Image (cartoon, rainbow, N blue to C red):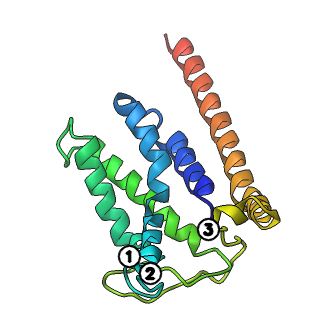
Amino acid sequence: MPTGFSHSLLGVAAGKIFGSERFKKTKIRFWILSFICPSLPDLDVIGYYLGIPYAHVMGHRGITHSLFFALIMAILITIIFFRSEKFSSKNNLLIATYFTLIIASHGLLDGFTNGGHGIAYFAPFINDRYFFSFNPLQVAVLNPKKFFTEQGFDVLKNEFMWLWLPTIIILIINAIVHRTNKKFNEIKNRNGK
């Protein structure tokens, strides 16, 4: 799995690209949840301490990494934190879709790692584990003592190259497009008056 830093970075980047203007009313909640939610699937590491086998549906990279989990968590998050409108409102359906995607991004990223067991994308219905055929991401170091070693630094360098740098480039392009559209609309509105 990538580090929690990278999962959270992608959640915040997605919020910047897709949500910053849409969810102004709930800005603080939106940003905190955008930071936390992409890392939620790794709560399953508690299973290590409870003796749950890795390959079990409740084990690491099991149900909490599934698309089903992402959808259920997104619905609960929308109902609990964005209840000022009906769940079926257009805004809340967009919020639920957004959170489903950023939570599901965790399992998708883990599918690009080079170690561990695969991901149970279709749990609880199918517990088969899958990886993508392209695996450029190094598995993160789970032991905090090892994280601050050369091995942990290698993981961070790998994530910077494969995740952080492309995300930063996408954010820069998005900002340029957003500014260009804003200036174009200002010019259009001035000329239209």
Q: Earlier in the sequence, mark 2 or mark 3?
A: 2
Q: Secondary structure at mark 1?
A: helix
User: Residue placed at 40% from the left, 70% from the top?
Assistant: 64
Q: Is residue 1 left or right of residue 49?
A: right
Q: Residues within 10 Å of mark 2 (few under 14, many from 20)?
A: many
- Amino acid type, callout 1: Ile
Please name the residue that numbered disc 3 is placed on: 142
Q: Where residue 97 appears, x then y in whole percent?
A: 36, 55
- Residue 111: which quarter of the image? bottom right
User: Residue placed at 21% from the left, 40% from the top?
Assistant: 83
Between the residue at mark 2 and the residue at mark 3, the CA separation in whole angstroms equals: 20 Å
The quarter of the rendered structure image containing the N terminus is bottom right
Q: Is residue 109 visible?
A: yes
Please name the residue that numbered disc 1 is placed on: 63
Q: Where residue 71 appears, x then y in whole percent?
A: 33, 63
Please name the residue that numbered disc 2 is placed on: 120
Q: Is residue 85 left or right of residue 20?
A: left
Q: Are the residues tagged 2 and 1 within 8 Å (C-beta)?
A: yes
Above/below status of 143 relative to 51: above
Above/below status of 89 relative to 55: above
Question: Which residue ends up furthest to the right in the rendered image?
Answer: 150
Between the residue at mark 1 and the residue at mark 3, the CA separation in whole angstroms equals: 19 Å
